[in-house]
Image (cartoon, grey):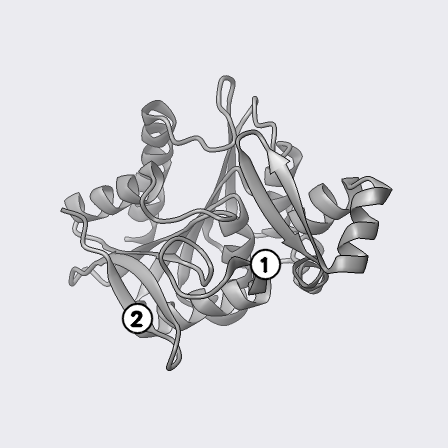
């Protein structure tokens, strides 16, 4: 049985999360993507892996996501980054951890290096989407959509079977959270995983993330038949193998 928990971040707001705790003092932290939750295959897969290997584990739903409090349209990268920062301080505390970021989660994960660079011992990106709000949305929106967002403050875009409300404040906040022009000089292991058939985020964005790390031991793995999610069992097992290597390096 999955044990979901809640933690208050204010009088009226709380985050939903799942976790494991072991005395090994090393955590895996999974950060989900845009409008995602922690009921999917990836967070449950990594939680199970952590439990079997007696590692700490944490995954959360940002405000406005899943069953956490808040409205999605009031959220942005800065807010969700602070959600992660808050819960790491409360749950993981001073323990070391390896970050696993899926899509937007990789962007939010990169932001955590501002606060926890001495605790982060490895970084994994799955279909990484840093700065996607500007580079993959706003810059590619037709003039009509840009005008609607500017005038009304919000629009709804469709991607496959999903509909996403995109607000002007979300776009503007995304511009303040630039990470691709920065450098992270930590001697850690960094691995990016990307599907060749990803129709949401081009592979070049995983390559851009690797360039941020100028002293890390880096690896890029491209799945020839993989999509954006990479939540199939085969892909997850490949990611698991690299995760095991990173854990051995930390130990």
- SS category of the residue bearing label 2: strand
Q: Quadrant of residue 43?
A: top left
- SS category of the residue bearing label 1: loop
Q: Nearer the viewer, mark 2 or mark 1?
A: 2
Tell me residue 207's x, y (percent). Answer: 62, 38
Q: Which of the pair 46/182 is nearer the observer? A: 46
Residue count near mark 2 (Cα–Cα under 10 Å), binned few <14, some 14–19, many ≥20: some
Q: Is residue 88 visible?
A: yes
Which of disc 1 and disc 2 is earlier in sequence?
Answer: 2
Cα separation, mark 2 vs mark 1, equals 31 Å
Label number found at residue 194: none
Label number found at residue 7: 2
Label number found at residue 184: 1
Q: Which of the pair 173/237 is nearer the observer? A: 173
Residue 187 versus residue 206 in the image, above or below: below
**Residue at 59% over, 39% down:** 206
- Verify CB contact (< 8 Å) between mark 2 and mark 1: no
Residue 13 versus residue 229 in the image, above or below: below
8 displayed left or right of 123: left
**Residue at 75% over, 58% down:** 152
**Residue at 46% over, 65% down:** 70
Residue count near mark 1 (Cα–Cα under 10 Å), binned few <14, some 14–19, many ≥20: some
**Residue at 80% over, 58% down:** 150
18 displayed left or right of 84: left
Tell me residue 50's x, y (percent). Answer: 23, 47
């Amino acid at each position: 049985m999955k044990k979901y928990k809640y933690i208050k971040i204010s009088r009226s707001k709380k985050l939903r999360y799942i976790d494991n705790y072991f005395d090994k003092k090393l955590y895996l932290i999974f950060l989900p993507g845009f409008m995602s939750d922690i009921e999917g295959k990836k967070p449950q897969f990594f939680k199970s892996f952590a439990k079997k290997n007696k590692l700490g584990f944490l995954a959360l739903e940002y405000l406005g996501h899943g069953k956490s409090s808040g409205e999605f349209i009031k959220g942005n990268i800065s807010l969700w980054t602070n959600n992660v920062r808050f819960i790491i301080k409360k749950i993981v505390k001073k323990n070391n951890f390896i970050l696993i970021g899926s899509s937007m989660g990789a962007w939010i994960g990169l932001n955590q290096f501002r606060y926890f660079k001495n605790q982060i011992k490895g970084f994994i990106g799955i279909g990484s989407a840093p700065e996607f709000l500007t580079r993959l949305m706003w810059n590619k929106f037709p003039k009509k959509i840009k005008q609607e967002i500017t005038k009304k403050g919000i629009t709804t875009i469709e991607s496959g079977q999903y509909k996403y409300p995109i607000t002007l404040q979300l776009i503007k906040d995304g511009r303040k959270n630039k990470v691709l022009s920065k450098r992270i000089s930590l001697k850690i292991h960094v691995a990016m995983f990307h599907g060749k058939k990803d129709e949401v985020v081009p592979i070049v964005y995983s390559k851009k993330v690797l360039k941020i790390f100028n002293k890390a031991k880096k690896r890029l793995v491209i799945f020839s038949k993989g999509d954006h999610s990479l939540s199939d069992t085969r892909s997850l097992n490949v990611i698991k193998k690299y995760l095991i290597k990173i854990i051995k390096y930390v130990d």
